[in-house]
Amino acid sequence: MNQTKCRLFDFNVQGQRNPILNIIFKNYKLPEGITKPDIAIGAGHKTHLHLLAIKRCFNAKIVVIMKPSLPLMFFDLCIIPKHDGIKNGPNIINTQSSLVKFNSNLKKKENTGLILIGGPSKHYFWDSKIVLEEICKISKKFKFRKLVLHFEKDAI
């Protein structure tokens, strides 16, 4: 199994200036302590223009986790619930259900983890034992009180 170390940064786009101007002038200021991203992931309509600004300014890949309000071709990857009626495509992955309903009522203090597990792939060998071992490691490392697992159809 190939693994890559990565650093995760989370910031609120509401504190950012007008993303349209950032796109036009190719100037997006990241909050202090956040390095140039290779990939940016957003959910919520207010993140779309910020994702596009990050793509233009830092040449980052951008992922939206919802049906975007902008054309799908603007994003490198769109993870969209099937119920939105968008068919799979080169940059579209459909989920069986909305990701939001799994964690929308959870409070941060509850220390709840959400793990999404995809289905069969012609590119990777699936080893259920290894997957379960990795889930256990993650759960122990972050000391989750609750762990929500969502399996795509035919995942195991």
Image (cartoon, rainbow, N blue to C red):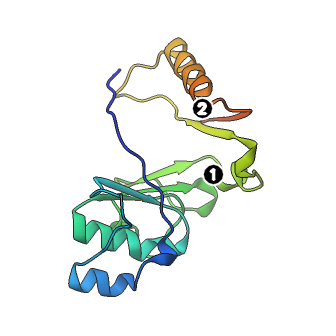
Q: Residue 119: x and y, percent?
A: 52, 32
Q: Residues within 10 Å of mark 1 (few under 14, many from 20)?
A: some
Q: Is residue 58 left or right of residue 16?
A: left
Q: Residue 117: x and y, percent?
A: 55, 33
Q: Residue at x 70, y 40 (%)?
A: 112
Q: Residue at x 57, y 48 (%)?
A: 95
Residue lying furthest front in this view?
32
- Residue type highlighted by circle 1: Leu
Q: Residues within 10 Å of mark 2 (few under 14, many from 20)?
A: few
| Quadrant occupied by the C terminus | top right
| Quadrant occupied by the N terminus | top left
- Residue type highlighted by circle 2: Phe
Q: Look at the numbered disc 2 and give the secondary structure of its residue.
A: helix
Cα separation between marks 1 and 2: 21 Å
In-front residue for pair 42/96: 42
Q: Which residue is mark 2?
A: 142
- Res. 111 visible in picture: yes
**25 vs 71: above or below:** below
Q: Look at the numbered disc 1 and give the secondary structure of its residue.
A: loop
Q: Which residue is mark 1?
A: 99
